[in-house]
Image (cartoon, grey):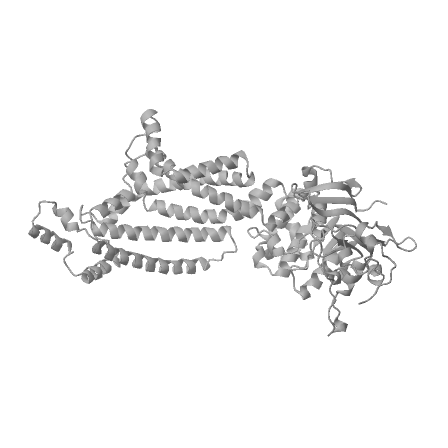
Amino acid sequence: MQVLTFALRRFGRLLLTVLLISTIIFFVIRVIPGDPALVIAGIDATQEDIQAIRAQLGTDRPLIIQYLSWLSDIVRFDFGTSMISGQPVTELILERFPITLSLAVMGIVISILIAIPLGVLSAVKRWSLWDYLGMVFSQMGMAIPSFWLGIMALLIFAVKIKIFPLFGSGSIRHLILPALSLGIARAAVLLRLTRASMVEELSKEYVITARAKGLTERMVKFKHALKNALLPVITVAGIQLGYMLGGAIIIEQVFSLPGLGRLFLFGVYQRDFPLIQGGVIFIAIIFSLINFVVDLFYSVVNPKIRIR
Amino acid sequence: MEHLLEIEGLEVSFNDTAHALRGIDMFMDTGEIHGLVGESGSGKTVTSTCIIGLLPVPPGKVNGGSMLFKGREILGLSEAQRRRLRGREIAVVFQEPARYLNPALRVGEQITEMLILHLGLEKQQAVGKALELIDLVGLKGGKKILRRYPHELSGGMKQRAMIAMAISCNPSLLIADEPTTALDVTLQLQILRLIQSLKRRFSMGILFISHDLAVVNEIADRISVIYAGRIVESTTKARLFDEPLHPYTKLLLLSIPDAGKRGTRLKTIPGTVPDAEHIPSGCAFHPRCPLAEEICQHQDPETANYGKTGELHTAACHMIGKKWIDS
C-alpha cells in the first residue's frame, strides 16, 4: 500500500518533470540557429523549395501553435515521425534501445564488480598495497577519458590480438570491449565512494558493539559495516546507470555501435526536432524510473528511509 | 579467595605520552554490582575497554599490570582468545543505544547472531531463546519486536534490547558503561531496577560505570572512585557515603543535588580533571584539593587500607584524618 502511494506520487512527479524538460527543449531547439528544412533541402535548394519543406514539416507556423499541436500529440503518446527518415520516433528509439540497454547494464555490472570489492578491501586494509592499487586505479580511471581506453582496447584486443570484433553489433562479443571501457571509467568514482563510505561506517559506534559481542572480524566488517556502507554506493550506481541508459555517445562512436547516443547525436546534427524531443522525453523517463527503483531498493537496504 | 575480576597495577598510555591509566587496582566478585565513578576523562572507559579487550593498539598500549578473570590472566591472551571471551563471558551495555545498535539490522538478528556464534544454536533455537530474552528485559510484543529495526523502538526499548543482547550468552561479567545517561530520568530508574533483577537471576558480576554518584548510589554494592587514571578510594557503598576518606570523594558527595536543600547553591569542584598528557606531579588531585600541603605536590600517595576489623576501605591520600574545613 505504502509502495503504491509512493509509486503514484512518483508518477505524478515524473509527468511534471517530463513536461517541463520537453517544453524547455522544444523552445530551445527552435530558438538556436539551424533549420531542419535547410538540412533536408541541401545546398542547392531554392527559396521556394525550402518554404515548401517548411510548410510540409509545419515549422512555418507560429511557435505557440507548433507547441500546442506538439503537446496534443504527446498526450496521445504520439511522438511524431523523424523529419529526416520519416520513421516514427518511438520506433527509432525502441530499435536502438536494446543495444544501449545491454551496454549500460554490462557497464554498470563491470563497474560494480570492480569498485565494490576493491573499495571495501581498500577501506578494510587501509594504507596497504591494495589500498594504493585501488587509489592508483581510481586516479587513472578518472584521468583517462573512456574513448581513449576504448581506442586502446580496440588496438590491442581487436587489431593486434584478434579476440574481439573491431566494430559492428549483434552479439555479446561486440559489447564486451565497449562495456569494459565504460565500466572502468565509472568504477573509478564508485571505488572512491565505496572506500570512503566503508571507512566512515567502520568508525561508527555500532562497530564497537559488534566487536564487544565477540563477533569475528569478518562478521563485523562484511555483515555489520558493509550493509550500511553500501547505501550511498547504490544511489550513485543508479545515477550512473541512468546516464548510461541515455546512450554513451562517445563509446558508441568509437565502437560504431548503433545505440541511442548516436541516434540522438545525429538528431541534433540534423535538427530533427521530433527525434530530439522524443529522445529528451525518453531520457527523462528513464532517469525517473531509475530513481524510483533506487529509492525502493534503498528503503529495503536502509530501513530508516521510509518511502513516502 | 579467587575474585571474578582482579586488576592490579594496570597502566595504559596512548602514543606513549598520554598516561590514561596509572596503576589501576580493583577487584570484583560474582553477584556484586561494582560502581566505578569518575568525571569524564578520568579513565573509566579506558578501564572498561581494557577489560573487554578492545583497546586500540596503537595508539593505546598496556605498559604494565595484570588482569585476572576467574583466576586466569587475560592481558596476554591472543586476539582470538579474547574474542571468544567477549560477548560470551564478558559483555557490555553501552551508553547510547541509538548509536551502538546497528541501524541496518533487525533487533532479532542482532541478538540471535551472538547465540548462533557463541552457543552454537540453530537459527530456530536462537529465535526461541531471543524471545525469552526480550521478555525477560521487559520488551512486550514478542516476535514483532524481533522484526523491528532499532529506530522503530523508543530510547528505553532500545536500551532494553541492548541489555537482552548483552545477557544473551549468560556472561559472568557485565560491564554497564553509563547505561542510563542517555535516558530520561523516569526511564533511568526502570533500567537500573532491570539490571539489578538480572544480576540476581544470572549471578553475574556487574561493573557499573558512571559519572553520577547519585545513580551509582541507587544500584552499587561497592564503589571505586577513579581520578586521573588511579583508583583514589574504594569501599562499600554505605561506608563511602557515611565515611568518605579521600577529599575528592567528599567533594563529589557534596556536589550531588539534594532535593531537601532547595535554594542553596550547588557545590562544584573547582578546576577540571587533568588531561592524560599533563598529569600534575605528586598527588594528581593536589591542584584542586582544599587540603593539599607540600608533600602532596611531590609524592604520589600509596593506596592503603583504612577499614576497621577486616573491612576493606582503601584510599590514596596523604591527608587522611586531617580535619575537613567546610567552606
View extreme (top): residue: A161
Q: Is residue A191 left or right of residue B126?
A: left
**Which residue is at 74% across, 50% downward?**
B229
- Residue B194 lies in quadrant: bottom right
Quadrant the C terminus of chain B occupies: bottom right
> At which x and y percent is residue A36?
17, 50
- Residue A11 lies in quadrant: bottom left
Observer-nearest of A25 and A131: A131
Task: Report whether residue B200 is seen.
Answer: no
View extreme (right): residue: B309
Quadrant the N terminus of chain B occupies: top right
> At which x and y percent is residue B146?
60, 54
**Which residue is at 46% across, 47% downward?**
A234
Q: Is residue A125 above or below residue A89?
A: above
> At which x and y percent is residue B12?
72, 44
Task: Report whether residue A274 is seen.
Answer: yes
View extreme (front): residue: B294
Q: Is residue A39 above or below residue B157?
A: above
- Residue B285 lies in quadrant: bottom right
Q: Is residue B262 left or right of residue A254?
A: right
Observer-nearest of A217 and B318: B318
